[in-house]
Amino acid sequence: MEMSASMRDRLIAANQREYGERYEQLRFPAPAEAQRALARRAELLDDLYGRVVVGNGGTKLDCTGLSPGCRICAEGGWSCLFITGRCNCRCFYCPTGQTENDLPTTNAVDFRTPADYVGYLERFGFRGASISGGEPLMNPKRSLAYVRAIKKHFGDAMYVWLYTNGTLADEDLLRQLADAGLDEIRFDIGANDYQLDKLRLAAGVIPTLTVEIPAIPEDLPRLKGMLGELRDAGVMHLNLHQMRLTPYNFEHLAQRGYTFLHGEKVTVLESELTALEVLQYSLDNNIGLPVNYCSFVFKNRYQSQAGRLRNSRFMVKSFESVTQNGYIRTLTLLGEAAVVTRQIESFKTMSIDDSLWNKGNGPDKLLIHPQLMGKIDSRAFRLQVGYASCRQLPSISYHNPFVTIPVSPTKSVIIERGRAAADVELGEEAQERFISFFLSGDNSSPMIAGNDSLAELVPFEHGRQGLQDYF
């Protein structure tokens, strides 16, 4: 779906707010430059068509040979535990400060004991867990304790992997991780100038060996040249991330001559093209090493979607529904009080479950579940649509409705519900199309133009599709 001009303006404004005065240091593409880059991306994607599997609404490729951990992530079943905030490397592309020796944390919620985290994984139905940082091997005792506890409780039902720059790895520690049950280890070889000596130690010890690095544009020739070496060293999967700008890496990235892109966050244009070129090169030359481009929009959209879906089930009301993109949808009929009263009486006459509707906070409103839309006279009402999202918090904010979810005898997680956008009242024609597009049970994304009145609802219903726009 083409992005509307108003949506572009909002994203640009948000990017400007995030970086303030420093925003002027960033170079974004002029329209003609953006079109040339889009044409180059289209050329690459056209060449890859039929040779790769594209997943997650066109944001992830190649999905043919994903590692088991990546597959679980793509399906929304993954939890990432940041075991420490400290790191012994200072990679220019790192998005965070990496200086704090924090407690193990996920979604801003800390887990002081392995048992607490195991309870969390079980309560929220995860199928995969990763240990990240910082650098997890700076605290090997803690990392091992969490891996052991997870595998002891879940066994093969929970796939566990660990991210590392590898600089602190040795044969003994890798063997301990394997004995603890670690299924996969992922090396960021960009942290040590693409050296493979520590990575080779893990081959044949940890069942799945993966390299996961950002796609650094100036390293494209080097990446192409070492694909065969990675394969021969025992690497089974190569994951390439799109580089993104953050307040922490701003000074490093801003001085490297990159072209930045507006969007949900600011990203590096050349990084995406680099990843696609590496994927193309690998296939053209039959390297035999599966390459996965993990775009920023995949991570931002689909990992966020998974969290919303996981949390919404604890707070959705019986007369509401959860959209494909994980937002709680509230449908409100607006009409004269007498008409609302007659509709309620009609529901009672039809013996409709009264949990599927609610009188709301006024005589001229009636909140209904989507399955009741076919049982009302839509001409008698105006339709108002609202969306809410749910997030996990470490403590109660008291700003919004919340629930407390116990995950162990000593740990609970707070889920808070907040409005995601202003309510939208639909006209008669838009109401009919809303029902057709979003309430029909068809999970495919409708073709809606950027200037369509329903375009602003797409991110809440199906989510945006495809790789990011260039502007």
Image (spheres, helix red, strand yellow):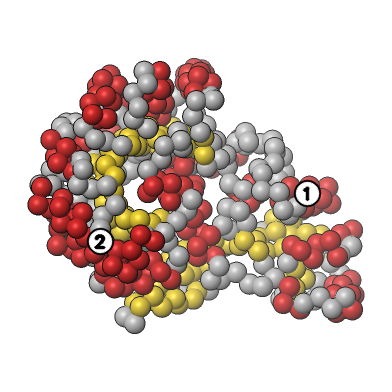
Compared across the picture, whether 392 is left or right of 325 comes to left
- According to the picture, the residue beneath numbered tag 2 turns out to be 147
Identify residue type, mark 1: Ser
Q: Quadrant of residue 344?
A: bottom right
Q: Nearer the viewer, residue 243 or 383?
A: 243
Foreground disc of the pair 1, 2: 2
- Asked whether residue 102 is in view, the answer is no
Q: Quick one: label 1 or label 2, which is nearer the N terminus?
A: 2
Q: Position of residue 305 (x, y in %)?
A: 51, 53
Q: Residue at x 35, y 66 (%)?
A: 154
> On the rendered structure, is 141 left or right of 238?
left
Q: Is residue 209 above or below residue 82?
A: above
Nearer to us in this view, 231 or 2: 231
| Crowd around label 2: few <14 · some 14–19 · many ≥20 (10 Å) | many
Residue under the image location 53 percent in, 60 percent down? 309
Is label 1 in a helix, a strand or a loop?
A: helix
53 over 274 or under it: above or below: below
Q: Which circle marks residue 67 in the picture? A: none
* Residue drawn at x 61%, y 53% as measured from the top left: 324
Label 2 element class: helix
- Three-letter residue code for mark 2: Val
Q: What residue is disc 1 on? A: 436
From the viewer's perspective, tell me whether residue 167 is left or right of residue 124.
left
